[in-house]
Image (spheres, rainbow, N blue to C red):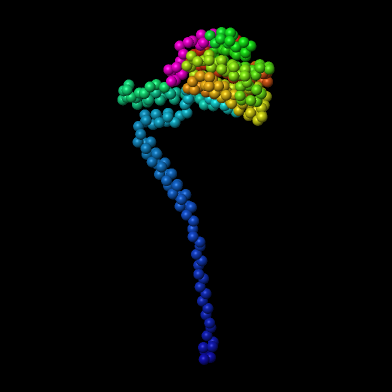
Amino acid sequence: MADDDKKSTIIIVKKMAAHAGAHGGAWKVAYADFVTAMMAFFLLMWLLNSVAVEKREALAEYFQRFSVFTEGGTTFIKKDPVFAPVPGAATKAIPHILKGLEHLSPGDFGEIPHLPWAIAGKSTMKPTEFAEKLAKQVETQLGELKDQVKIEVREDGVRIQLIDKEGRPMFKSGAIEPTALGRQAITFMAKALADMPNAIAIDGHTDAQGYNEGSAGNWSLSTKRALAARDLLEEEGVSASQFARVTGFADTDPYVPGDSTDTRNRRVSLTIMFPKASDEGFAPE
């Protein structure tokens, strides 16, 4: 018994490892997306490698930015075009387009849409003839308003400028709706252009005075005035398909370069497009 009392008591302590909580599966989703993207990438590489060189070039041309117009919309930086054609893009693409049309017969083509100025709707009248005819109409039919209509032949066509005069504005200060005089001038132009299928570009201009939103307000104001002129022209009979562009230039292209606040800088310009119009050399006051 004495020996039993001397025996030591042994205590065994076992530490049970705690289990962490359930792991999230977000990494699996991310990994699956990565694997899918890599699969798509290598599939694209394989497809491109299997396509003939000529077709790859045509495909590359398709994704190039291209526009038949060299001028774009409103910009807050400068009055240069927002978009410009990629040099040689059309020339390189034409052979591929023609090759794809070889198997088509004349019956496969539908009616050619109305394309003013560019192809089907170019007027047979020369720009100088049109400018002279319009100048005579302005002289005999617009009365005092004739002094606010300026006509000139430029490289891109015949430009008609409807200019503000002190006390005789085309638009009220800061407004986008034309005044009675403005409506009279724009309506007159719509009637004068009734027989002209050529494309029309409309530009809005302001002076350097800020309106509501400061300098940014001039960009908005000039663009909205150009749009208002476009809407009124269409309302008075000009075809919607004739409008090539509507642009706001704010005060970046003044009529009076030496005085950015001159009343005459506030104007709306209509350009009736004629290819190589500048060769005609007509510029009436």
The residue located at (66%, 27%) in the rendering is 211
Q: Which residue occupies the extreme bottom position in the image?
A: 1
Q: Position of residue 233 (x, y in %)?
A: 54, 20
Quarter of the image with the C terminus in it = top right
Q: Which residues are magenta?
A: 114-132
Asked if residue 5 lies in the magenta stretch, the reply is no
Image height of 144 relative to 179, above or below? above
Q: Position of residue 83 (x, y in %)?
A: 52, 26
| Residue 168 seen in the figure | yes
Apparent side of residue 209 relative to residue 137 in the rendered image (left or right): right
Q: Position of residue 144 (x, y in %)?
A: 63, 11
Apparent side of residue 44 relative to residue 138 in the rendered image (left or right): left
The residue located at (40%, 39%) in the rendering is 44
Q: Nearer the viewer, residue 48 or 254?
A: 254
Q: Position of residue 171 (x, y in %)?
A: 63, 21
Quadrant for residue 164, please give it.
top right
Q: Main secondary structure of the magenta part?
A: loop
- The image shows a total of numbered marks equal to 0
Image height of 204 relative to 31, above or below? above
Quadrant for residue 100, please give it.
top left
Q: Nearer the viewer, residue 281 or 57?
A: 281
| Residue 248 seen in the figure | no
The residue located at (46%, 13%) in the rendering is 123
The residue located at (56%, 15%) in the rendering is 188
Image height of 14 relative to 78, above or below? below
Asked if residue 120 lies in the magenta stretch, the reply is yes
